Amino acid sequence: MDIGTSVITPSESAEDTLPSMFWGLDPIYGVFAKLYIKDILELKKSQPVPGVFFYKTHPITKVDILGTIVQKRERERFFSFGVDDGTGVISCLWWKKQRAMENVRLASSPFGLNVLEQLNRINQLENSNSQLELGDVVQVRGRLRDYRDQREINSTSVSKVVDPVFTAQIARMLELPYLYRNFYDKTFQIQMDSSDPNQQGEPTLSLQRKIKQFLTQNGVKNFYQQELEAIDSLVCIAEQNCVSLCLHHPSQTSQDPPSSACVSKQIHELFQQAVCALQEEGIIFQKVAAHTELYLMLIRAVLSITSSAVCVTVTVRGLVRLQCRGYWTDWSATAR
């Protein structure tokens, strides 16, 4: 409201990198983004959709800041205070909660609990926590907006941080560079599914299906990856896929056939990818966390456990039925 450093210019309007219908695919959209105040003040606003701002390619509507109160003003319906995190100062609004508790009529509790008294205590606690003073460290969450060409946060949550050893501030200082490096500074791109059969996923899927079929038909309980690579039918499928990939590679010419070493290496990698895909699908699991160790069939184990559980259920149900018949016979004899 009165923070001079939060003034923005009309030239800061952003060109939306994606249509608005795809903004929800960005994991940063809709969350409270932890940003430096300097970057919040420099966010470019979206022209077609008000209330949306952009940090590079990421749409942002809500932010989470931690800083020190350097300015405070109280109005009839809200508080206005400036928060400084060392990179800049931004104005925050904290609306007062209007509750006429004296006009509230509540039913008496059967347990002797005075609900009105408990609500008054909650209000007093909230009021005491909302008594912000200059120099207090606060964590503010809220929605961004521009009001009279000034950037401000419409707060939904304001928490006073009582931290004499600055643990929260140090943690935020360590967290922000990590978030910028791994999320905010990376360009958001929509992953498109490829329908080209010559892509890497198609041969892997073909071999994955054949391995799954082989394990199921032959009742294999456990295996090593090297054992699969010795099965002629599976190696034949993998070899055909690998030769096809080598021939379609841009660096491969029709006069130079793929070398046997290249094909052998790609066959091994293709088996590795197929086994990993079966693991992700839940068909098999690895007994020891190493790529040369034993794999176990999960479906057979689940079916065995399920069949055992069914047998136990049938047995218990039969015992309960016999017991109930005994009770019914005893009750009938007593009634007579």
Image (tube, grey):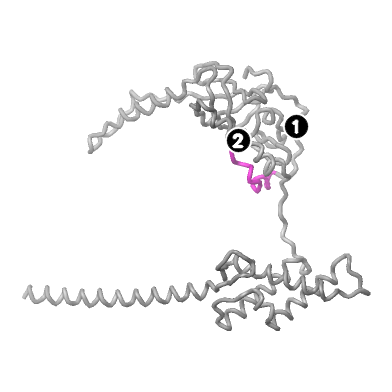
Q: How many C-alpha atoms fall within 10 Å of the one at disc 1: few (<14), some, or many (≥20)?
A: some
Note whether 211 is above or below 140 in the view shown: below
Q: CA distance from mark 2 to mark 1?
A: 18 Å
| Residue closest to the eye, 245 or 190 | 245
- The residue where tag 1 is placed is 13
> In percent of the image, x 52 and y 16: which residue is there?
74
Q: How many C-alpha atoms fall within 10 Å of the one at disc 2: few (<14), some, or many (≥20)?
A: many
> In percent of the image, x 59 and y 31: which residue is there?
65
The N terminus, quarter of image: top right
Q: Is residue 102 left or right of residue 294?
A: left
Q: Is residue 228 left or right of residue 72?
A: right
- The residue where tag 2 is placed is 62
Q: Position of residue 190 (x, y in %)?
A: 71, 51
Note whether 136 is above or below 143 in the view shown: above
Q: Are marks 2 and 1 in contact (CB under 8 Å)?
A: no
Find residue 255 and name its label: none
Q: How many marks?
A: 2
Note whether 118 is above or below 321 in the view shown: above
Residue 170, quarter of picture: top right
Q: Secondary structure at mark 1?
A: strand
Q: Position of residue 16 (x, y in %)?
A: 74, 40
| Residue closest to the eye, 231 or 328 | 231
| Residue closest to the eye, 48 or 217 | 217
The magenta segment is 20-33
Amino acid type indicated by mark 2: Lys
Q: Position of residue 76 (x, y in %)?
A: 49, 17
The question of residue 329 being in magenta is answered with no
